[in-house]
Amino acid sequence: MMNEDEVLHYALLDINNFVTNIITIAEKDLGTLPDLVASNGASYAIEDNLVYKAQIQGTYDGENFLPHKLFDSWVLKEERIFSWEAPVPYPSDGLSYIWDEETLNWVELVIE
């Protein structure tokens, strides 16, 4: 059992389960959580004891917090603690690249 000085971490979620805010609240103040959630027009999920912690713009799938997905084509790799990866591996030739969603490939970053 927690003592009243311990804190819990909650992620506020919008109607699409996107994380809009992360709050830390003392055990003694848990009674105010419903009012806080209602005033933000959100629902919430506790983030303590989960493998991946919540982040703003990430999502909650009902069981886990997922990081923000940078590109539609990227795929979720659960074995790497819920990270999104490009469908094409990053080149290993030592050059710098950026992801091009239109061509679904890495494009060399040229700085002039």
Image (cartoon, rainbow, N blue to C red):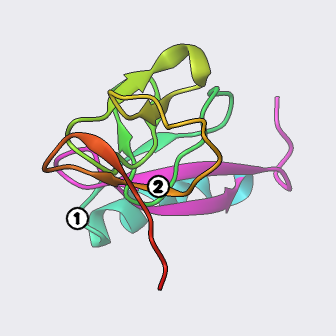
Magenta segment boundaries in residue numbering: 1-26
The residue positioned 43% from the left and 36% from the top of the image is: 66
Q: Nearer the viewer, residue 72 or 7?
A: 72
Q: Residue 19's x, y, as percent?
A: 38, 54
Q: Residue 74's x, y, as percent?
A: 31, 34
What is the residue that sits farthest to the top in this orientation?
Answer: 79
Q: Is residue 9 magenta?
A: yes
**Residue 55 vs residue 36: left or right?**
right
The amino acid type of the residue labelled 2 equals Tyr
3D distance between C-alphas at marks 1 and 2:
40 Å
Q: Nearer the viewer, residue 92 or 66?
A: 92
Residue 83: numbered disc: none
The amino acid type of the residue labelled 1 equals Gly
Q: Residue 1's x, y, as percent?
A: 82, 28
Residue 41: numbered disc: 1
The local secondary structure at tag 1 comes to loop
Name the quadrant containing residue 40.
bottom left
Of the numbered discs 1 and 2, the one sitting upstream in the chain is: 1
**Residue 93 vs residue 89: left or right?**
right
What is the residue that sits farthest to the bottom in this orientation?
Answer: 112
The residue positioned 57% from the left and 62% from the top of the image is: 23
The local secondary structure at tag 2 comes to strand
Q: Is residue 17 magenta?
A: yes
Q: Which residue is mark 2?
A: 97
The residue positioned 13% from the left and 50% from the top of the image is: 102
